[in-house]
Amino acid sequence: MGRLLSGYVLCATSEGKSQKSVAIVADSVGYLEEFLIKHKGDANVAEVTPTEIRAFILYLKEKRRFDNHPLNPAQQRGLSGHTINTYLRSIRIFFSWLTAEGITNENPFHRVKIPKAPRKVVPTFSDSQISTLLGAIDTASPSGYRDYVMILMLLDTGLRVSEMAGLRLSDVSIADGMLKVLGKGNKERAVPMGRQVAHHLWRYISLCRPEPSTPRIDHVFLTRDGRPLSKDRVEKLMRRYGGKAGLTGVRSSPHTLRHTAAVSFLRNGGDVFSLQRMLGHSTLEMTRRYCELADVDVKRAHVTASPVDNLGLTHVRGPSKKRSRFPGPKQQ
């Protein structure tokens, strides 16, 4: 299994799969390999049946967090449903690849039902929390103003933090209010930004952006010494501002801004298909979850979207008198 895994990594990387996605599959398959060696003595992919997969599922459900971890002590809590679901879906990808390559005749997952991940309520920032968060930033300093612009951009566009960190000057069209974003799977998409974000972005680029440390660096957001601002750095900044603002009950992170952007977009009248394109989702599944979170006022929406009201029918008067439910014979 280990030798075949290196073949999968080579194939997936050549097909443009993200490094993170490939790493998740590799780690998950490694966990299955360890389980099989421990309980069967070997990890021959040709001998993995639905029975072994189901036994592995039970093993994951009983496993404690950080069990046998070289650095962290084991915890009483077990693996979350999301973690188990991710492991199994990743291993299924590996076995699908084995089948497609003709290495195995049958994918054992075809007869195994993967436990569904529990659906969690995704927390979002309230309007007052956003105001408090923005108020904790010293916009008088160039780096503070940069952070202010980044948070506004994440909140307005719903970009992933890695997508924002990867933005280059050539990806920005201030006049059109558009961003060219490189998302998951190296897929490009156009994302609009509002007038206020465009204005602040122009001010940052024109007045506050540091001189790049090397001529080849053309990222939009830079550190004070002119280097590209990393994803991890942005996440640390968010945690710091959240602590400074005293925010509680919600995680102060770029991903929370993405959730907030999606929910606010729907509450303000945006449609799910535009949101799907804006966020770069390949399916509507996650967008549907945002619909549930947004708790969109259906009655208010129906006022403007009523199928009959929008037909423009002329007024028709009904009968002037109430008629009997069972009328008698017609009069000759």
Image (spheres, rainbow, N blue to C red):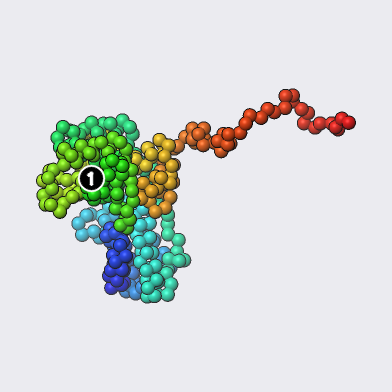
Q: Position of residue 53 (x, y in %)?
A: 40, 66
**Location of residue 244 with respect to 53 vertically, above or below:** above
Q: Amino acid at mark 1?
A: Glu
Of residues 19 and 152, the one drawn nearer to the viewer in this rendering: 152
Determine crowd level at label 1: few under 14, some 14-19, many 20+ residues with C-alpha closer than 10 A.
some
Q: Position of residue 274 (x, y in %)?
A: 41, 45
Q: Based on the displayed image, in which of its 4 quarters is residue 73 positioned?
A: bottom left
Residue identifier under label 1: 235
* Residue drawn where x is 13% and y is 43% of the image: 210
Left of 108 or right of it: where is 129? left
Q: Based on the displayed image, in which of its 4 quarters is residue 51 positioned?
A: bottom left
* Residue drawn where x is 37% and y is 71% of the image: 98
For this orientation, the residue located farthest to the right is 332
Of residues 134 and 112, the one drawn nearer to the viewer in this rendering: 134
**Location of residue 210 with respect to 114 vertically, above or below:** above
Image quadrant in which the N terminus is located: bottom left
Count of picture labels: 1
Of residues 120 and 199, the one drawn nearer to the viewer in this rendering: 199
For this orientation, the residue located farthest to the top is 321
Left of 134 or right of it: where is 300? right
* Residue drawn where x is 35% and y is 66% of the image: 94
Q: Based on the displayed image, in which of its 4 quarters is residue 209 positioned?
A: top left
Q: Secondary structure at mark 1?
A: helix
Q: Is residue 158 visible?
A: no
Of residues 113 and 153, the one drawn nearer to the viewer in this rendering: 153
Q: Position of residue 328 (x, y in %)?
A: 84, 31
Image quadrant in which the C terminus is located: top right
Q: Position of residue 189 (x, y in %)?
A: 33, 51
* Residue drawn where x is 30% and y is 41% of the image: 177
Q: Is residue 58 visible?
A: yes
Left of 319 or right of it: where is 224? left
